[in-house]
């Protein structure tokens, strides 16, 4: 049954870039809410999906069809924050291009989660900086994800070590939708970095002898979660040689995408990417639905790790990350029951 809420009831913002990512996100909701009435003076052009996961009221926004990139993501998230003022943290969830290496056995369908690594906070804009004779000098640092979300990631990692496959559990919510099943994604093929795509929409004409031979994983359907740096830029990465060079320059990145760098300093969020290709010339869209579903499943798991405890407190104290008076270790959020407020804690 659909529910009608108020703008101030929503405390989690979820941003995605593509309709397939939005569809996967909607399937992770415990319930969907009615659309909110729009004020005649409201300049918000975003369209939102409203719902709840594990007691959190979540507002989901997708970038306009056919438009992607860091700048647009920043504009959409900024408008969402202006409309839903009680949002305390965000999630950027969707697909990305993987960076396979000896250090990280990244494969299609795997999940990459932004996490501070070396000098980076989890996301780096790889195509921005100053041009020097030695190459591009990248300038500016992006914020790390909020501490409450990194704490939830730590709990997820601990459960993985204990053999608890939470991602598969949440993926089962999509079991009746054929488009999102791994079996329909096709084979997972990685070509040598020096070998470019031949021709056509698929790799049927590409030389099978140039495929990289990899040891099969235990359990063919196993999804692995990787944690570290995500490279974000305003152009699609389609060159394996450039992919590997950028990764070396940045001390090892796990995937490439096109929205996160626009969010990190103005919309504190955790970036979660399902790997749909290898950031090379062989990329196609066959793995996008399954990759979108694995990312969404992980995002649901993160939210379920952050419990809500109802507690009375002055409204002025219920400030979060975006107001500047909160901190990343104890997030306080509004609730929909009268003047009651919620405090996030870790399950």
Image (cartoon, rainbow, N blue to C red):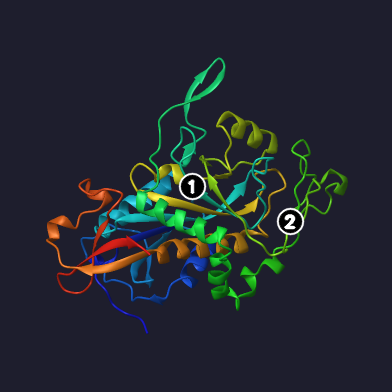
Q: Nearer the viewer, residue 62 or 260?
A: 260
- Which residue appears at 62% of the width and 63% of the height? 290
Q: Residue furthest bottom?
A: 1
Residue 86 figure quarter:
bottom left
Q: Is residue 198 left or right of residue 313?
A: right
Q: Label 1, on which residue?
A: 114
Q: Position of residue 19 (x, y in %)?
A: 51, 63
The circle on residue 106 is none
- Which residue appears at 34% of the width and 66% of the height? 307
Q: Is residue 111 visible?
A: yes
Residue 20 figure quarter:
bottom right
Question: Is residue 148 shown above or below 26?
Answer: above
Q: Label 2, on which residue?
A: 188
Q: Quadrant of the N terminus?
A: bottom left
Q: Is residue 223 left or right of residue 82?
A: right
Question: Is residue 247 shown above or below 90?
Answer: above
Q: Is residue 141 left or right of residue 249?
A: left
- Which residue appears at 43% of the width and 39% of the height? 121
- Which residue appears at 48% of the width and 66% of the height? 25
Q: Position of residue 210 (x, y in %)?
A: 84, 43
Q: Nearer the viewer, residue 28 or 178?
A: 28
Distance in Å between CA atoms under marks 1 and 2? 23 Å
Q: Position of residue 275 (x, y in %)?
A: 61, 53
Q: Is residue 239 left or right of residue 51?
A: right
Q: Is residue 63 visible?
A: no
Whichever of labels 1 and 2 marks the residue nearer the N terminus, that label is 1
């Amino acid at each position: 049954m659909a529910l009608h809420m108020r703008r101030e009831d929503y405390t989690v913002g979820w941003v995605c870039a593509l309709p397939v990512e939005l569809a996967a996100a909607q399937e992770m909701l415990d319930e969907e809410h009615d659309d909110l009435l729009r004020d005649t003076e409201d300049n918000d052009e975003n369209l939102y999906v409203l719902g709840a996961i594990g007691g959190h009221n979540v507002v989901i926004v997708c970038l306009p069809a056919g438009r992607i990139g860091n700048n647009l993501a920043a504009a959409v998230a900024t408008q969402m924050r202006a409309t839903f003022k009680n949002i305390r943290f965000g999630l950027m969830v969707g697909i990305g291009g993987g960076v396979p290496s000896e250090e990280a056995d990244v494969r299609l369908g795997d999940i990459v989660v932004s996490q501070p690594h070396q000098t980076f906070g989890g996301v780096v804009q790889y195509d921005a900086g100053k041009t020097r004779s030695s190459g591009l000098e990248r300038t500016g640092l992006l914020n790390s994800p909020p501490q409450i979300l990194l704490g939830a990631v730590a709990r997820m990692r601990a459960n993985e070590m204990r053999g608890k496959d939470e991602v598969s559990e949440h993926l089962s919510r999509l079991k009746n939708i054929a488009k999102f099943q791994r079996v329909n994604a096709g084979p997972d093929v990685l070509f040598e970095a020096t070998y470019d795509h031949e021709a056509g929409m698929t790799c049927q004409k590409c030389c099978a002898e140039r495929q990289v031979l990899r040891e099969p994983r235990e359990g063919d359907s196993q999804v692995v979660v990787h944690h570290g740096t995500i490279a974000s830029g305003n152009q699609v990465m389609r060159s394996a040689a450039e992919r590997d060079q950028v990764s070396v320059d940045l001390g090892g990145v796990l995937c490439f995408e096109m929205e996160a760098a626009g969010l990190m300093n103005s919309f504190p969020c955790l970036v979660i990417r399902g790997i749909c290709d290898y950031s090379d010339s062989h990329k196609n869209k066959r793995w996008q639905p399954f990759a979108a579903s694995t990312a969404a499943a992980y995002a649901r798991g993160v939210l379920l790790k952050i419990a809500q405890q109802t507690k009375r407190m002055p409204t002025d104290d219920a400030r979060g990350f975006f107001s500047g008076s909160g901190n990343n270790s104890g997030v306080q959020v509004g609730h929909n029951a009268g003047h009651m407020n919620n405090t996030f804690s870790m399950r």
